[in-house]
Image (cartoon, rainbow, N blue to C red):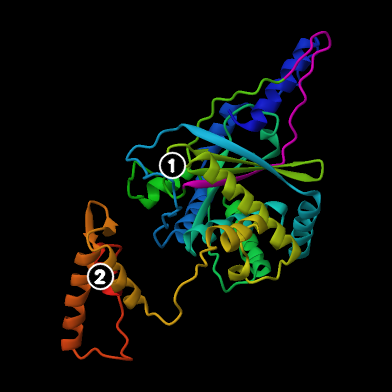
Amino acid sequence: SDGVSMNILLSDFMTAYAGEELPPLRIQYKDYAVWQQGTLEVERMEAHEAYWLSAYAEEAPVLELPTDRVRPAVPSSEGGKVYTEVSTKTAEALKRIAAETGATLYMVLLAAYNVWLHKYTGQSDIVVGTPVSGRTHADTEPMIGMFVNTLALRNAPSGEKRFIDFVHEVKARTLAAFEHQDYPFEELVEKLNVRRDRSRNPLFDTMLILQNMEQTRFGLADIEVRPVELNHLTTKFDLTLNVVEREQRLQLLLEYSRTLFNAETVERRLTHFVQLLSQIAGQPEAIIASISLVTAEEEQLLLHAFNDTAADYPREATIHGLFEAQVEKTPNAVAVVYENRHLTYAELNARANQLAWTLREQGVGPDRIVAVLMDRSVEMIVGVL
């Protein structure tokens, strides 16, 4: 089923329960199926296919989001969710940006979502999935059936662009995608011959959904009805952001894969998204590189808590001199550890001296610069010393 069908089902149930006749449908779902297989529709699908194959002429990027755990070979569907709200002030500002650019609120949110993902990954080619109702003909609106399709929206956020200009880009690409929304997503995946990776979804691993469909209020004349929240949550994607417009506010629900993320990580990232929206709302002309995800509280933690490392030390001493004094004081104490390897102060000092002599033989002396290009290791510390 799809969301529209659920509303129709509830409405029909209430009508029937009240003893009223349901209005007859002009066409049935089987008629829609026959129409889809017709010659004109097949020709139209070829034009849709050409658009999507052009959009993915270059191989789709893999989104490299930082995760709390290593991605398993076969993902679990176990999910979690976190909630927050965007203030009325920010929501109204975002709608103004949409009006000024001739875009929709969804397009502004999609631009922001791309910037948010760009900030975490550094990638400038990002694909985000989104569902569309698929009911492009008036006769399908009162029908129960699975019409919904998924669009893989590809955009290019990068640091040097102004956010407002990026909204225009997203608007153009989204309008083009919606013109070709009837092309089935599974057909696109098959045509592109996407490399099979069981640990990921084809084309994208994150979705954005704006819920702007009115939910049918379920009520029966002689029975009290109340909704029941189902807590068991499954998720197909790494992250899915659901946005609901309600009473001038925006409610945000971020679903996540518990295989990959801890709840605290996702809560922090959702806070970052709200921070991003707040900055965009106040300064839509800002360069994307200048937009920060860090909240005021996090900034204080970074500046004054985590990095308050000031300590007294002899100002006339050199770093290597202080190190050698420690070698004399505690030669057998462990100085450096990496994985299952370790060196004592005496061993580290000896290794650093050996390397120093080697460098001197290569002509290194005072005021000469030597680059250290190494992965994290015991040898890196030897090289620095």
> Residue 366 appears in which quarter of the rendering?
bottom left
User: Which quadrant of the rendered structure holds the N terminus?
Assistant: top right
Residue 99, image x, y percentages: 78, 60
Measured in 3D between alpha carbons, the distance from the residue under mark 1 to the one under mark 2, in whole angstroms, is: 35 Å
Is residue 90 in view from this perspective?
Answer: yes
Q: Is residue 207 magenta?
A: yes
Looking at the rendering, which quadrant does residue 200 occupy?
A: top left
Mark in front: 1 vs 2: 2
Q: Is residue 293 visible?
A: no
Instruction: Give x and y (percent) for residue 219.
Output: 79, 17
Location of mark 1 (residue): 260
Dot label at residue 382: 2
Q: Residues within 10 Å of mark 2 (few under 14, many from 20)?
A: many
**199 vs 377: above or below:** above
Left/right placement of residue 239 relative to residue 142 reads left
Within the image, what quadrant is residue 11 found in? top right
- Reply above or below: 266 against 112: above
| Residue 108 falls within the magenta-colored stretch | no
Residue 99 vertical placement versus 246 (above, below) = below
Q: Amino acid at mark 2?
A: Val
Residue 115, percent from left and from top: 58, 60
Residue in front for this viewpoint, 259 or 185: 259
| Range of magenta residues | 205-226
Q: Nearer the viewer, residue 130 or 265?
A: 265
Q: Callout 2: helix, strand or loop?
A: helix
